[in-house]
Amino acid sequence: MYLSIMQTVLSLLPFATAQLFDTSNSITAAVGLPPQNSSILGNYYNYWSHAANTSTWDLTRSTALPTTSPKAIPMSGSRKTAIIEPSRSALVIIDMQNFFLHPSLSPRATGGRTAVQPTVNMINGFRQAGMKILWTNWGLDNFDLLTIPPSFIEGFSDDDTEATSFGSEMGLVQTDNGTVDAGRKLWRGAWNSRPYGPLYDLQVEGMAAGTDLYFNKNRLSGLWGAQTPLGLWLQENEITTLFFGGVNADQCVWGTLLDAYYKGFDVVYVDDIAATTSPEAAVEMVRYNANLNGFLTNSTAILDAIR
């Protein structure tokens, strides 16, 4: 009787709520797994299916959730193809901000600036396919300064003091269009916190059109802790599959991807829209572990598949 009631109740819940129940072994046991089949991993509400004798993984969860026009995305890692549901997929762009990419503030970020055009292409392609763009950037306020740990303060300081760390005035910066006030370091609304170059106009355009959303974060990861603005939106909108790009690949991009993996999302690392100023070994670590945790691909493969 109890099992029947639980199954009925959970069948009425939205997918995101079912994901939360799914973290409890006792509830999972009550709900039960799909029919015993070596090609299915997970439970009725949250699973991957694997075509026999192939390296194709179906991430649509189509027996529990509606599908529109699933897309098969070629992958470059050990899992060669992923079938996604566009209505439950999104592009997460991490920290492509003036602070990290503008030559006057980060002259070494040549890789990040190279990633801008492929990122633009991905944004346009995802919009055309009806998939959301999720800008996830450092954007601090006064409350954050009360709660941010000293290790973070030191890491973003120019001289090992709070005077040059988060929220400090960065002064004037030379740009192609003249001198601008960079504003407070990684502060919400400051010029240094805006998306870099053509990405800023795209972000403003997308926000106005409703195709894009903007989330401030106050740690390396946009999904750290019990909940964040990004995490809440993903849960409420029943998103299951996330494509990641941005800077720095081994720090904020990796931190957010890893937390997404821990929380049960499908994670896809898009190699040519992510970059870092760290040594190449750091990028190799990201690729290696992203392949273990999810999928690897590039923007060209994705765009060809979703057109």
Image (cartoon, helix red, strand yellow):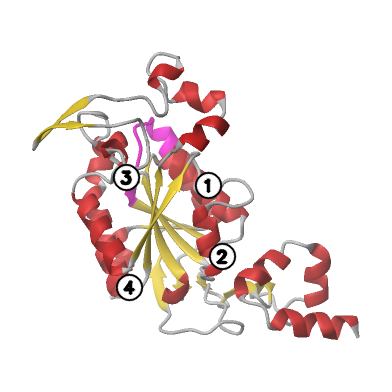
Q: CA distance from mark 2 to mark 3?
A: 24 Å
Q: Which mark is residue 96?
A: 3
Look at mark 4 in the image and give the residue it sits on. Answer: 305
Q: Residue at x 44, y 69 (%)?
A: 89
Q: Is residue 291 left or right of residue 212?
A: right
Whether residue 234 appears in magenta in the rendering, the answer is no
Q: Which of pointers 1 and 2 lies earlier in the amino acid sequence?
A: 2
Q: CA distance from mark 4 to mark 1?
A: 24 Å
Q: Are marks 1 and 2 in contact (CB under 8 Å)?
A: no
Q: Amino acid at mark 3?
A: Met
When the figure is inspected, residue 73 is found, relative to residue 191, above or below; the finding is: below
Whether residue 276 appears in magenta in the rendering, the answer is yes
Q: Quadrant of residue 270?
A: bottom left
| Residue 75 appears anywhere in the view | no
Q: Which of pointers 4 and 1 lies earlier in the amino acid sequence?
A: 1
Q: Which mark is residue 235?
A: 2
Q: Amino acid at mark 2?
A: Gln
User: Mark 3: few, some, or many residues within 10 Å (few <14, many ≥20)?
Assistant: many
Q: Which of pointers 3 and 4 lies earlier in the amino acid sequence?
A: 3
Q: Are marks 4 and 1 in contact (CB under 8 Å)?
A: no
- Of 214 and 8, nearer the camera is 214
Q: Which of pointers 1 and 3 lies earlier in the amino acid sequence?
A: 3
